[in-house]
Amino acid sequence: MAASMYYNGDDWAIGGIEEAGTWDGNLEEVWHIVSVGWYAVYPEYFGVEFSDSDEVIPSNLTDAMDAARGGQFMSIPDEYPEDAWYAYYDDTCDYHCQAHEYFYWILMSNFGALDSSLTTKCEDSKDEWNVCTKAELEQTDVIAFDLLNNHDFNLPTNIPDGSYMNFNENNNSDD
């Protein structure tokens, strides 16, 4: 299983974070499921693969994550470098898992879900991630910003709110 949500233990924002005024844990858990498609279709950009000798096969995502963590760490360090902007200390989360978490954070920053006018999520998570807006992502995490914005991957660009138009209505097509 790539994700899990619990009714009595996770944050839910019915109608989206802008409407509910609170964080929605679904943004992370659903993204962990959906992102598997990008990993599979674009491994040179989003892959988290290892060679036969257990070396990381570089991708844009792993290169960006290694830069964000201040180095390539195959196991959780006691402390990340002072200039790291992504520091995840969960001992159960291996390199592959770290990349999945990182992909979630950069996407949330990129489409504005961490903006302090909407939520305290970024402030509450500053020990792990502290790039809260698209402008900050562009300045701080150049590799990730390029990955998300300059390659036509059809990644989400808006904060989900539960309101979606029918594909055929959007395209005025009878197909």
Image (spheres, rainbow, N blue to C red):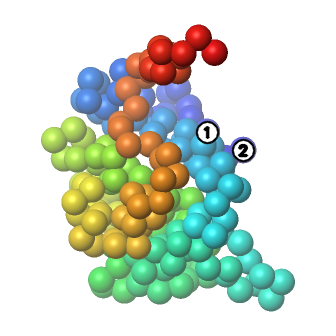
Front position in the image: 53 or 82: 53
Q: Tell me the element at label 2.
A: loop
Q: Residue 140, can we see it?
A: yes
Q: Amino acid at mark 1?
A: Ser
Position of residue 38 in the picture relative to residue 89 (left or right) = right
How crowded is the residue under tag 2: few (<14 C-alpha within 10 Å), some, or many (20+)?
few
Residue situated in front as seen by the camera: 136 or 173:
173
Name the spot of residue 39 as percent of width and height, x first: 65, 58
Looking at this rendering, what residue extends furthest in the left direction?
A: 117
Q: Is residue 91 shown to the viewer in this render?
A: no
Q: Quick one: quadrant of the C terminus?
A: top right
Q: What is the quadrant of residue 6 in the picture?
A: top right
x, y percent for residue 170:
45, 20
Separation of disc 1 and disc 2 at Cα?
8 Å
**Residue at (22% x, 60% y) in the render:** 135
| Mark 2, residue position | 1
Could you tell me if the residues under marks 1 and 2 are in contact, i.e. CB atoms within 8 Å? Answer: yes
Q: Residue at x 35, y 79 (%)?
A: 84
Q: Is residue 17 above or below residue 144?
A: above
Which quadrant holds residue 144? bottom left
Q: Which mark is residue 4?
A: 1
User: Residue 72: x, y in percent?
Assistant: 53, 84
Is label 1 in a helix, a strand or a loop? Answer: loop
Amino acid type at image mark 2: Met
For residue 100, side relative to residue 142 (left or right): right
Q: Is residue 133 above or below residue 146?
A: above
Looking at this view, name the residue that lies furthest to the right: 52
